[in-house]
Amino acid sequence: KAGVTQTPRYLIKTRGQQVTLSCSPISGHRSVSWYQQTPGQGLQFLFEYFSETQRNKGNFPGRFSGRQFSNSRSEMNVSTLELGDSALYLCASSLAPEANTIYFGEGSWLTVV
Amino acid sequence: GNSVTQMEGPVTLSEEAFLTINCTYTATGYPSLFWYVQYPGEGLQLLLKATKADDKGSNKGFEATYRKETTSFHLEKGSVQVSDSAVYFCAPHGSSNTGKLIFGQGTTLQVKP
């Protein structure tokens, strides 16, 4: 059974550009969450999606957005990139929001220069 | 909302030593509790979980017991190995109807031969 797949694994962007990250959850999982991990702030919750609906959103500016498709795959987008957006972006999937088994992908390493 | 406090690291131990990483949480209700482990350059791996009071989660020699009275979920291992060197995160569910996890700052474990 394939795990949570995130693409791309590594990318470098320039300030002001935008980036789209993709997450394919485990087959059958319909709930997807995103987290940002930085050395200074640790792991911070970005958004949660279930059945194509955003259920929760963390305390991030509007430059951070996301969506979920009918096949449960999810994307997040960051526009007008800033140096501080350099981070590991992690996607997590579960059968449903209240499910008590949540699996993470390997993450997408974003460097903004 | 829910929150979590982990003991500060790094924790440095010799191989075969006993490990305890403290975790306490504040929560409304009785959320499921998780320990995740992150090896260098990787995403988060689910180490163990407990879904109700007095439950004991265990995996790979690690154990943690859901203590409702002390709101704690301390991680223990009887004999650590060099390969256990990693960052460990304690995380309760944000609330009962969400997949959002609340992460502590993580505890770095270094095991020396």
Image (tube, rainbow, N blue to C red):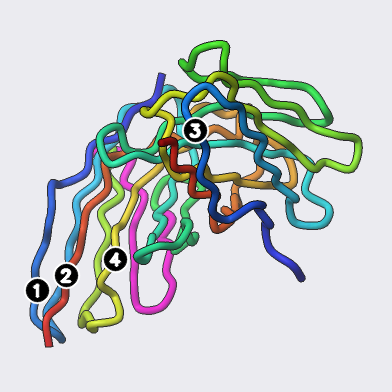
Tell me where residue A30 appears, x and y as whole percent.
79, 41
Mark 3, other Cα within 10 Å: few <14 / some 14–19 / many ≥20: some
Q: Amino acid at mark 3?
A: Thr
- Which circle, 1 or 2, is nearer the viewer? 2
Q: Which mark is residue A14?
A: 3
Residue at 21% x, 58% y is B108
From the viewer's perspective, tell me whether residue B70 is left or right of residue A45. Answer: left
Tell me where residue B12 appears, x and y as whole percent.
9, 68
Measure how far apart labels 1 and 4 are at the Cα level.
Answer: 12 Å
Same subunit, labels 2 and 4: the answer reads yes
Residue at 38% x, 29% y is A83
Q: Quadrant of residue A22?
A: top right
Secondary-structure class at tag 4: strand
Residue under pointer 2 = B110
Q: In the image, is residue A1 above or below residue B96?
A: below
Q: Amino acid at mark 4?
A: Ala
